[in-house]
Image: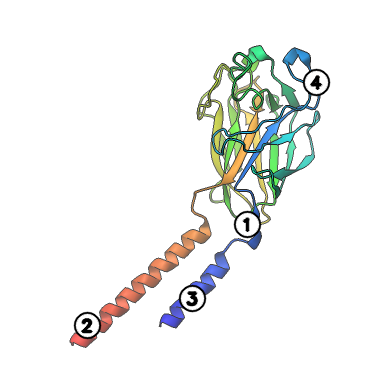
Amino acid sequence: MKRIIYSLTAVVMMAVSPPLHASTVASLIDIKFTPNTSNTLYNYSGAVTYDGSVQVGNIGDVWNILEPDLSAGVSTTLMLTSGASSPATLTFSSEGITTLAKATSGFYGSGLGEYKNLMNSYNYVVSGETGSFTISGLAAYTHYDVYVLTQGNKADNGSILQLTGPNKVGDPTTYTQAGTSNATNSTFLTGQNYMMETFRADAGGNLTIEYSSAVAGKNAIVNGIQITNSAAPEPASMLLIGVGSVLISSMKLRKKNSADNSVA
């Protein structure tokens, strides 16, 4: 009986285990959108980098800096927060990437704000349009927590971001930002200037998320993205738990029957 149980457990684990490359996929990827032009009006000169943490991560974490002026169809190889290469790549579409004036963002403050270099620009689509970003090279059928920074600027306050992507059961689901930001915040507030939703990669390890504005006349704004492995139980884990429970119950029942027979 024990030999059968061990064999069954091994078969189940092999059948539901993620691909071997899953362990090499980034546990955390940070993405910042930055134009590749200089503009003294916006206190901006060249590509401004950012190293550090926001909602997840640590001080000194490396951010991937995406710099195209015209962003449609751009594909970029992503790095881990350690700076090491990652098998993940990003393709995204938008209207463009723009910079923020010092007077239009609360993160600038006196010009020395902690997140000034991170929040000084954003990726956007206009009202009525839909943008998207696809991260490839992830583990198949795996859940990821995606943090989307979306403060924008005072000139476009009142925007409410919508994110649509595969949810925990793989079906497209739309999540709507709970509140709005007036762009004066200098700290991150959940549902107001950032969202965190859990999405699921498909069979090929691709994760596509669309974004749009829920408010007519307002742009849909994405300042940055963080993606990390989710704490949500994977289907494989749930199946193993279920099988384990059944096996344990069977062993207990077998012992009970053996004890009853001995007494009889």
For image coordinates 73% across by 38% down, the residue present is: 92
Where is 104 relative to 258, above or below? above
8 with respect to 77 (left or right): left
Color encoding of the figure: rainbow
Q: Amino acid at mark 2?
A: Asp
Mark 4–mark 2 CB contact (< 8 Å): no
Report the disc number at residue 200: none
Q: Position of residue 110 (x, y in %)?
A: 61, 13
Which residue was labeled with disc 4?
Answer: 38
Q: Of the residues tagged 3 and 1, which is closer to the observer?
A: 1
Q: Position of residue 100 (x, y in %)?
A: 69, 19
Q: Position of residue 107 (x, y in %)?
A: 60, 20
Q: Of the residues tagged 4 and 3, which is closer to the observer?
A: 4
Q: Nearer the viewer, residue 103 or 249?
A: 103
Mark 4–mark 3 CB contact (< 8 Å): no
Mark 3, Cα crowd under 10 Å, few <14 / some 14-19 / many 20+, is: few
Mark 2, Cα crowd under 10 Å, few <14 / some 14-19 / many 20+, is: few
For image coordinates 49% across by 60% down, the residue present is: 237
Report the disc number at residue 260: 2
Q: Of the residues tagged 4 and 2, which is closer to the observer?
A: 4
Q: Amino acid at mark 3?
A: Leu
Q: Of the residues tagged 1 and 2, which is closer to the observer?
A: 1
Calculate the distance from the C-alpha at mark 1 to the C-alpha at mark 2.
Answer: 47 Å
For image coordinates 29% across by 79% down, the residue present is: 255
The earlier-in-sequence mark between 2 and 3 is 3
Q: Amino acid at mark 4?
A: Ser
Secondary structure of residue under mark 3: helix
The earlier-in-sequence mark between 4 and 2 is 4
> Quick one: which residue is furthest to the front in this view?
60
Which residue was labeled with disc 1?
Answer: 22
Calculate the distance from the C-alpha at mark 2 to the C-alpha at mark 3.
Answer: 27 Å
